[in-house]
Image (spheres, helix red, strand yellow):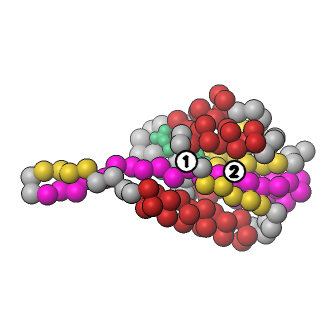
Amino acid sequence: MFEHIIVATDGSDHAKEAVKVACDLAKKYGSRLHIVHTPQAVGDTLIVGYTAVPVPPTKEEIEKSGREVIGATESVVRECGVTDFTSQMVSGDPAHAIVEEAKAHKSDLIVMGRRGLGSLTGLLVGSTTTKVAQLAPCAVLTVK
Ligand code: ATP
Ligand code: MG
């Protein structure tokens, strides 16, 4: 039923659950699995005396952290027994990146967490998932 599944991860526990569900479906349907991650720079601050100085991470630091998320996700996928998978780190807006990857890979299913790394407690569905559900060219499965 599902030939090409995309799973989106921000490295959160929610996304890890989504990866496990995506793997289960991939094994059941013999699907190709594609992992997508968009590393995000979350501005940090350095306190110098009484002053908070913004210290944005460098491009290299962002890419390094992105590679770590991809590597950790690939390990989970292998542990789940899936061998037919690819992965891609994409820059830019995560929702658009996920939708573009889904189009490029002619995916018939996108699997993602209902929430991610966001800190807004009480939010039922995160902004990335909401946006992907609106723009996706295929089915979207959100995992709690
Ligand atoms: P918000 O970002 O709106 O504050 P949130 O972080 O809790 O809230 P989302 O960002 O919508 O919620 O995350 C939900 C799911 O979207 C994640 O579990 C993951 O599957 C996917 N996702 C979020 N950010 C990224 C990202 N940067 N790269 C790839 N997938 C992502
Ligand atoms: Mg988020």
Horizontally, is 78 left or right of 124 in the view?
A: right
Quarter of the image with the N terminus is top right
Q: Is residue 46 above or below residue 80?
A: above
Horizontally, is 3 left or right of 64 in the view?
A: right
Residue type (three-letter) at the residue carrying disc 2: Val
Tell me the number on the disc at residue 91.
Answer: 1
**Image spot of residue 107 (x, y percent):** 79, 43
Quick check: is the Cβ at mark 1 less than 8 Å away from ligand 1? no
Is the residue marked by circle 1 packed among few (<14), some (14-19), or many (20+) residues within 10 Å? some
Front position among marks 1 and 2: 1
**Image spot of residue 20 (x, y percent):** 70, 59
**Image spot of residue 7 (x, y percent):** 69, 51
Name the secondary structure under disc 1.
Answer: loop
| CA distance for labels 1 and 2 | 16 Å
Tell me the number on the disc at residue 7.
Answer: 2
Residue 67 visible in the displayed image: yes
Residue at x 75% of width, y 38% of height: 103
95 in magenta: no
Q: Is residue 29 above or below residue 108?
A: below
Horizontally, is 26 left or right of 95 in the view?
A: right
Magenta residues? 19-48
